[in-house]
Image: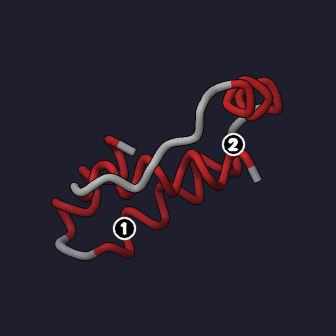
Amino acid sequence: MYAALGYELAAGDAGSADEELRRAIEHAPPEVRALLRRLPARTPGHSRLDTLHHALDAALRG
């Protein structure tokens, strides 16, 4: 999510963040997904970084 936020800030649009999150989700190994399912789920929060973190967490759990 930090890379996604960095791409978004550099490009000035949310599409850059979405692309980076998709890449991270596609390349996440099953072990990471299994580990995340054992931890409490993230809440959306208030900042853009919190929103990106929540989106990544939710996608990796699904």
SS type, badge 2: helix
Residue found 34% across the figure and 44% down from its top: 3
- Measured along the vertical axis of the image, is residue 55 above or below residue 40? below
- Specify few, some or many for label 1: CA neighbours under 10 Å numbering under 14, 14-19, or 20 or more: some
Residue 16, picture quadrant: bottom left
- Which quadrant holds the N terminus? top left
The tally of labels here is: 2
Could you tell me which quadrant the C terminus lies in?
bottom right
Q: What amino acid type is highlighted by mark number 1? A: Ser
Q: Nearer the viewer, residue 61 or 29?
A: 61
Answer left or right for 30 relative to 40.
Answer: right
Instruction: Specify the color scheme.
Output: secondary structure
Q: Position of residue 47 (x, y in %)?
A: 22, 55
Tag 2 and tag 1, C-beta contact below 8 Å: no
Amino acid type for the residue under numbered disc 2? His
Residue bearing the label numbered 1? 16
- Residue at x-position 79% and y-position 24%: 31
Q: Position of residue 34 (x, y in %)?
A: 79, 29
Q: Which mark is residue 42?
A: none
Place of residue 5 in the rendered image (x, y in percent of width and height, measured from the top left): 28, 53
* Drawn side of residue 56 relative to residue 16, left or right: right
Indicate the secondary structure of the residue bearing disc 1.
helix
Disc sitting over residue 27 in the figure? 2
Of residues 35 and 44, the one drawn nearer to the viewer in this rendering: 44
Where is 55 relative to 33, above or below? below
Which callout, 2 or 1, points at the residue further toward the start of the chain?
Answer: 1
The residue sitting at 47% across, 56% down in the picture is 20
Label 2 vs label 1: CA separation? Answer: 17 Å
Circle 2 residues within 10 Å: few <14, some 14–19, many ≥20:
few
Q: Residue 37: x, y in percent?
A: 74, 33
